[in-house]
Image (tube, helix red, strand yellow):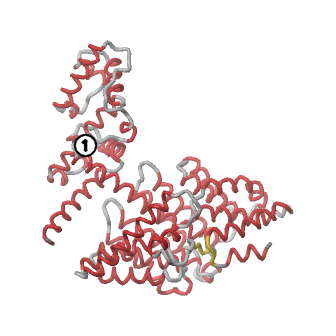
């Protein structure tokens, strides 16, 4: 049983094969009540399930092994256990439960005696907390960067002569952390390309210095993201080199998500270099792979992403499964998930931006998710006389048409007095006709107003947030930003930045033609 576990822990296996092997060890350990085997194989199974985003099974295993893990009083294992549970909760949207697990993990880490292991685990937990902040409603970019920097600071404390350094784990971890920070600065709402350059260069320098000890998966991710960075930096030749380097490395270990990035920026860079044939080649590959990933994300089966990708690219190719390098698995899973979630989150935010533009073009009111579910038909569902209800509706329509909502001290009492009615009746009509409370009704009118101003009038895009908030009737910039993001899913800064980018792209396209 020990030999089977060791084989799964050291060799290059598909995730499903590893789960099968480790599950046998886990079941056999339970049969003979071998607690060390239960603990080790159980923790390993959690990591494997998390790598497949199968949080239900990971949590199920965690519940089964909890007492055994705690009984052993190995604080490194206890920290790993709580970190894995936290990741499961965060993935499933249970942010408070996830944060509680982080606190438990942090308490365990403080009791680890080996200083390098303590630094490494503290670094891990800070990266987890950065991931936590990326999942919150606010999605505070500054908090994400702050905790990723703390993760790097702890990681850099690890001795370059100890066991973690000799195994390559230290430098592999530092490559990944620098890559994360470079990516954070490059993909934030207002990209900071100069700061991102510093961290990408550090990651590349480490990779070149310790190439033989850096995992292939980390090198693949590094060169894919360097391809993105150099494209943004308008260094198209270096972008091409990095993209091709990533694809070359993937002959050893296929990573569909990194391949998607490489294809995208190879295509874009070749277009900028005037090589239309190469552009078309990699754009076709990018489209095919992106379609495959979309199919995969919709499936609820155990089929691997790589299988779907290979079937798309070549129906006659040999079937492959997605590969997970088990050695140093915790590093790979955390960093891969964080990079993927960061990129996935940015794509989700951008889709919200595109939805706003689509609504404007179709001359529709921008609605939040809860109001999208409400009927467009205004129905009196309260015990208000029909004549009164219609009068209040008519006054609401005039109020909206005359932009009365731009007054910055509007209250329910004030407006009901203006409408010659009582607050209870006005609140009921607003709720019945818009499916919103009074505050959301006023705020959404204001946000729709300023969004159209920003879209239609370029000069508004140059104004500061303070001015924009006052312009549409908000008493403070903070309330304005919160209301804007609540309605649209993006911040005002993100919306303005992308309007400017779209405008530049529009004129550059005209120049190209």
Lateral position of residue 104 relative to residue 341, left or right: right
Classify 261 as above or below 409. Answer: below
Residue placed farthest to the right in the image?
32
Q: Quadrant of residue 16?
A: bottom right
Residue 41 visible? The answer is yes
If the image is split into quadrants, where does the C terminus sit?
bottom left
Residue 113 position (above or below residue 489): below
Residue 119 shows up from this direction: no
Circle 1 sits in a helix, a strand or a loop, which is it?
Answer: helix
Of residues 75 and 511, the one nearer the viewer is: 511
Q: Position of residue 361 (x, y in %)?
A: 21, 48
Q: Nearer the viewer, residue 104 or 95?
A: 95
Task: Residue lying at the far front in this picture: please name it.
Answer: 316
Left or right of 403: which side holds 162?
Answer: right
Left or right: where 277 falls relative to 74:
left
Query: In the rendered image, which quarter is residue 304 located in?
Result: bottom right
The residue wearing badge 1 is 469
Give the image location of residue 239, x and y in percent.
Answer: 33, 79
Residue at the spot 22% in from the left edge and 81% down from the top edge: 274
Residue 470's x, y, as percent?
A: 22, 41
Residue in the picture at 23% in, 62% down:
501
Front position in the image: 304 or 6:
304
The front one of 403 and 197 is: 403
């Amino acid at each position: 049983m020990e030999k089977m576990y060791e084989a799964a822990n050291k060799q290059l296996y598909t995730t499903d094969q590893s789960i099968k092997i480790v599950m046998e060890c886990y079941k056999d350990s339970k049969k003979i009540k071998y607690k060390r085997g239960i603990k080790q194989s159980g923790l390993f199974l959690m990591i494997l399930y998390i790598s497949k985003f199968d949080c239900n099974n990971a949590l199920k295993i965690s519940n089964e092994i909890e007492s055994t893990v705690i009984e052993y009083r190995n604080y490194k294992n206890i920290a790993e256990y709580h970190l894995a549970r936290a990741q499961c909760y965060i993935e499933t949207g249970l942010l408070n439960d996830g944060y509680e697990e982080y606190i438990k993990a942090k308490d365990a880490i403080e009791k680890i005696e080996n200083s390098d292991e303590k630094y490494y685990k503290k670094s891990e937990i800070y990266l987890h907390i950065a991931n936590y902040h990326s999942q919150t409603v606010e999605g505070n970019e500054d908090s994400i960067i702050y905790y990723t920097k703390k993760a790097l600071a702890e990681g850099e404390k690890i001795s370059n002569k100890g066991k973690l350094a000799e195994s390559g784990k230290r430098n592999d971890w530092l490559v990944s952390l620098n890559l994360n920070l470079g990516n954070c600065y490059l993909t934030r709402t207002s990209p900071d390309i100069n700061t991102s350059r510093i961290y990408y260069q550090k990651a590349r320098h480490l990779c070149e210095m310790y190439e033989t000890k850096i995992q292939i998966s980390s090198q693949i991710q590094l060169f894919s993201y360097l391809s993105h960075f150099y494209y943004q930096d308008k260094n198209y030749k270096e972008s091409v080199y990095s993209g091709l380097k990533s694809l070359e490395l993937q002959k050893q270990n296929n990573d569909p998500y990194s391949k998607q990035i490489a294809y995208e920026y190879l295509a874009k860079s070749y277009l900028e270099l005037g090589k239309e044939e190469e552009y078309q080649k990699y754009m076709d590959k990018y489209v095919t792979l992106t379609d495959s990933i979309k199919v995969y994300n919709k499936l609820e089966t155990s089929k691997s992403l790589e299988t779907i990708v290979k079937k798309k690219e070549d129906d006659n190719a040999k079937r492959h499964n997605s590969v997970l390098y088990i050695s140093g698995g915790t590093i790979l899973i955390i960093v891969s998930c964080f990079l993927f979630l960061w990129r996935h989150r940015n794509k989700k935010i951008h889709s919200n931006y595109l939805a706003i533009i689509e609504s404007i073009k179709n001359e529709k009111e921008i609605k939040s998710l809860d109001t999208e579910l409400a009927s467009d038909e205004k129905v009196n569902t309260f015990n208000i006389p029909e004549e009164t209800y219609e009068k209040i509706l008519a006054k609401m329509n005039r109020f909206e048409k005359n932009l009365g909502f731009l007054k910055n001290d509007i209250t329910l009492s004030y407006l009901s007095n203006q409408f010659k009615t009582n607050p209870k009746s006005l609140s009921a009509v607003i709720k019945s006709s818009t499916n919103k409370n009074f505050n959301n009704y006023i705020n959404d009118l204001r946000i729709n107003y300023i969004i159209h101003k920003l879209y239609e009038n370029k000069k508004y895009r140059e104004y500061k947030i303070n001015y924009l908030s006052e312009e549409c009737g908000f008493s403070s910039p903070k309330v304005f930003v919160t209301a804007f993001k609540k309605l649209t899913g993006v911040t005002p800064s993100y919306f303005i930045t992308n309007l400017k980018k779209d405008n530049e792209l529009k004129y550059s396209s005209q120049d190209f033609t």
